[in-house]
Image: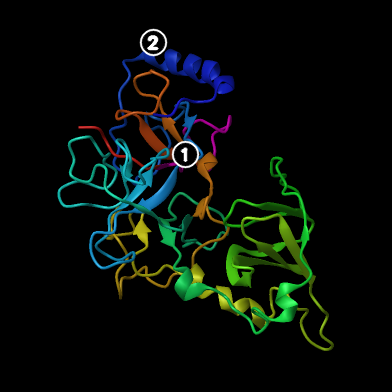
Amino acid sequence: MFVPERKSLIWTLLLASIIVMASPASGSDYPFGSKVLPNQSDIGRPLFPLPAETTVAFWDIGTPGYDEEDPVYLHIGPSASGTTNANDVRLTFLDDMAAGSKVTFHDYDMNKPITQLPSIISFLDIHGSRAYDLNDPVYLHHFDYSDYSYRDDSENSANMMTGFSERLPYRGREISSPGLGFVLFTDNYKLFTSDKILDKRPRRVGELRGLAIEVVCGLKADYYHVLGTWLIKIQPHERVEDGPRRGDESADRKGYDLRAQFIQTNDVRISSMGELIAGTKVTNFDDDQNKLVAWPPLASFLGPATDTTKMGFFDVNGNGVYDYQDDVYLNVPAGMSKGVVTVNNVRLSGPIL
């Protein structure tokens, strides 16, 4: 079980106690995947952050590899054995167990082996506003690196092996400011830059002494990193005469990443879209297949670099730990205090029966 940080514990428990005194504590009666609407009863609930180890994972129950049969979980907190925990949230249906339900000790999917699913929570910008709106459907969009890994002609060449130097990773908080960006690789190495990052998803492009090399593309340069080290190489883009600058958003080179940003088979609907209900997977020829995913994502689960700051739980019984009764939310947009349920949040768990 996860215990919230002490610095936020007193404030959150105080708000929770006010709610409890006003009315008996109870879980949300709203279904999994529904969005918080104005005047609904859970608006203003204080939220505890989920642990940093929270991730998205799947139980491989059939053909090896992630496919349509595999249930997907919000795996909350670490498990030494790499198995499902009690109170993990099912993001998909499993037999008679609904999406949004939680794993209990007597369920047959308790203590089952799970594999992390590299993925993001994103939305479809169906109104073209370039912002996350109330009616925009939300998806868990997965990545298959065997299909989408970017490789160029310089892989494993002399040029690929040279030019690296050690650079301390950035460990401060991200700053939202024009002209500043952050590059995050799948080993959680973070690089601070003044460049505009065009594609925040790292791609494997080669190896150095048996260690994988990843690249992230910016407007001014490409950023290479040897996983598991502090080795970084920054490759500035060259200006091409009478043509677009390498790295410019209009350049043809950016086309390689577009396929990975479309809704694809076996993505999970976190919220419903018409008759396509939350907790189901996208299949071939569905109306929402191949729709463009909005960027940046609402939350990220790529490698060990997860983004649990965008999620939280309401401590229903006020005991200070995450457990079976507690409701889980995608807290985007964040409440005024960045930890309060607000309009357009998505409920990531369903009613407790």
Residue that lies at the very extreme toward the top in this rendered image: 21
Determine which quarter of the picture holds residue 11.
Answer: top right
Q: Which mark is residue 21?
A: 2
Amino acid identity at mark 1 = Val
Magenta stretch?
A: 333-346
Look at the image and say whether residue 246 sits in the magenta stretch. no
Coloration of the structure image: rainbow
Is residue 103 rendered to the left or right of residue 243?
left
Residue at the spot x=50%, y=20% of the render? 12
Question: Does any portion of residue 271 appear in the rendered image?
Answer: no
Residue that lies at the very extreme toward the left in this rendered image: 96
Determine which quarter of the picture holds residue 62.
Answer: bottom left
Residue that lies at the very extreme toward the front in this rendered image: 209
Q: Who is closer to the viewer here, 85 or 37?
A: 85
Q: Who is closer to the viewer here, 130 or 235?
A: 235
Give the x, y percent position of residue 57.
38, 52
Q: Please identify, in this view, whether the residue under mark 2 or under mark 1 is nearer the observer.
A: 2
Q: What residue sits right under mark 1 in the picture? A: 343
